[in-house]
Amino acid sequence: MNDEFRQMVIEKLRRGEPLPAEWARELFPPERREYELVYHGKEREEDILAETMAVPLQPVSTFGKDGGDWHNMLILGDNLQVMKTLLKMKEHGQLTNADGTAGVRLVYIDPPFATQREFRGSQEERAYQDKVTGAAFLEFLRKRLALLRELMSADGALYVHLDHKKGHYAKVILDELLGEHNYRNGIARIKCNPKNYTSRSFGNIHDFIFFYARNNTTTLNEVYLERVLADVLEDFPLVDETTKKRYKTSPLHARGIRHGETGELWRGISPPSGNHWRYVHATLDALDSAGLIEWSPTGNPRKRIYAEDSAGYAVQDIWDFKDPGDREARYPTEKSEELLTHIVKASSQPGDIVLDAFAGSGTALAAAEKLGRRWIGIDSGKLAIYTIQKRMLNLKSEIGNKGDPLRPKPFTLYNAGLYDFSTLRQLPWADWRFFALQLFGCKDEPHAIGGLKLDGKLRGASVLVFNHLEHSGQRIDEDTVRDIHLAVGKKIGQRFFIIAPRATFDFQQDYIDFDGVRYYALRIPYSIINELHHREFSALQQPNDETAVNDTVDAVGFDFIQPPRVEWTASVKKRRGQMLHEACLKIKRFESRARLRGVDTRGGLETLSMLMLDFDYDGDVFNLDAVFYAHQLQANHWQAWFPADGLGRNVMAVFIDIYGNEAREIIPRDKFRSLSAKPASAGTKEKPQV
């Protein structure tokens, strides 16, 4: 239903007129589902796919070399916008599995459950508390599922991990988006040990994993659970006298009458009444020759099955994979690697792409890496990104992070929606032009009007990307816009867009009008102009305490990195009530700078999100060792305390504001030997990799 038809319906209803019978198919299309979940704020699928803004990916760091045509991807950003960008990559043949199939073969997501229930951390502190509930959460999830469906390969698989309070609502949404006929399993995952009985409810020890296929071509690989010794002794009670191997026997017949060879006599023996042989005669002869048929004293044959030849228990739809304990977990709500290993094995092959759009601690990515899959991880939190980065660079070969060190295949860290302008400014012209068009959602469509060469289109209007490299020092003022108008004003319609670095423009307003034509200034760096979108820009918020680590993020638009200013002192001393000396990093001053909706804002310590530390920085890669949230620092008078004996030659401190901006400080160990250190401002001469 387009806008024109919708308006016609509204007018008819407003005037109290009956709707024409021929409109019935448009209003109630027969292909619509028999039922759907209705709630406030539910958008049309078509609008979600069309209006979601794609944001370009800015490479930050690449880890490893010789990755060939594919590098695994770790992306910081709002997963909705990132997935729209990935969808464009799929359409251009840039998202393919090893066998050439377009799209993601396996999607696993563990989104925030939106239960308003507190979770406990390692020191009985709140690990996180979901903020989005009800209809808002369902629409938040539905939008992302709509993009995920489009990203999947034709034979892809989707696993959605939710709790018992929101899972059933999500099931209806999944049926709408992927079709109830593509629903394969509702897996009950036992997440913890039994709880104490209460007077109000039974103990809740499980959550749900909904498994959907993209269509009927999606297949499932056989996955087995390994038997423990006690199971072997119980399941294989017999012992071969010669080899001492344990075995069991099973019937060689099955229910049902067959009229072919399996229903006939074999060695003069007929299958029991109403049954047939499980195998043709040649196979039965081969089994007997191999000593795999045991004959009873009455001449009844049974097949021998040895324990060592058994693959284990075939996986059913109840899984006992408990969450990691407090000591083992790297991240709130982390799932076990064994759980994700089963999912990756079951629904992908080596070389297939595995996507986790709520990557968290990176368990799905680690499992994919160890099993030879390609992977893409997306998360909006800096803590998640640094946790995953460390995890991937410190992998062990065996599941559960045991065994020998495993060097991961090359992966690249990207920013999406929060960009480093200083790096962008250094791009060659062709790369700058491409990035600028992507940034504002423009089509790369070179054309010329009145002799003026233009670069693209934005909602049908012409776009000019100003070449600031070729015209260094040249400014764009009102006279420049007037000259463009005199040359092409009558031929370009009602809108025209000029993209250029912010400092190139000599006027402050977002647009200039000439004779009914509006000339927009799209500045870089600059947050997206609200008038061009249905929703206002919202920043990529970072948490300032554990309760917000897994908050749902729904950011629209983009912004640019503006490092905060920080002053600190470092020392080694005794903390009150402690016997041993500890290292102490005290924040004396913190000032964030952000550009929200085109307005420069500043804030103090209230805008600090967290402090991350690498106790032994190697000068190359930041390796996360400790996290201090703002509320923890405030409670300790803005001091972070940590063991002094674990410090290396240099300590890397990363101060992050609530908008995702970072100030990085390399602090020599010597600074911690004295009781005070000279305050330092944000930014170092060396710019380390993240």
Image (tube, grey):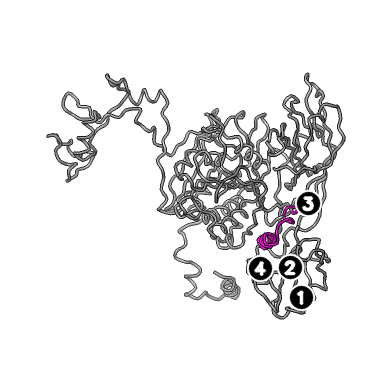
Are circles 3 and 2 on residues that touch, CB within 8 Å? Answer: no
Q: Is residue 71 above or below residue 331?
A: below
Mark 2 sits on what residue? 498
Are circles 1 and 2 on residues that touch, CB within 8 Å? Answer: yes
Mark 3 sits on what residue? 594
Q: Nearer the viewer, mark 2 or mark 4?
A: 2
Q: Amino acid at mark 3?
A: Ala
- Give the magenta range: 421-440
Q: Earlier in the sequence, mark 4 or mark 3?
A: 4
Q: Earlier in the sequence, mark 1 or mark 4?
A: 4
Mark 1 sits on what residue? 484
Q: Earlier in the sequence, mark 2 or mark 4?
A: 4
Mark 3 residue crowding within 10 angstroms, few (<14) / some (14–19) / many (20+):
many
Instruction: Give me the residue at 82% from left, 24% from top.
Output: 573
Mark 4 sits on what residue? 458
Mark 3 → mark 2, Cα distance in angstroms: 23 Å
Mark 1 residue crowding within 10 angstroms, few (<14) / some (14–19) / many (20+):
some
Q: Earlier in the sequence, mark 3 or mark 2?
A: 2
Query: x and y percent of residue 579 in the render?
Result: 78, 18
Q: Amino acid at mark 2?
A: Ile
Query: x and y percent of residue 418 in the render?
Result: 70, 52
Mark 2 → mark 4, Cα distance in angstroms: 11 Å
Mark 1 → mark 2, Cα distance in angstroms: 11 Å
Mark 2 residue crowding within 10 angstroms, few (<14) / some (14–19) / many (20+):
many
Q: Is residue 349 magenta?
A: no
Instruction: Give me the residue at 75% from left, 57% from top.
Output: 525
Q: Earlier in the sequence, mark 3 or mark 1?
A: 1
Secondary element under disc 2, as helix, strand or loop, is strand
Q: Is residue 27 left or right of residue 41?
A: left
Q: Main secondary structure of the magenta part?
A: helix
Q: Nearer the viewer, mark 1 or mark 4?
A: 1
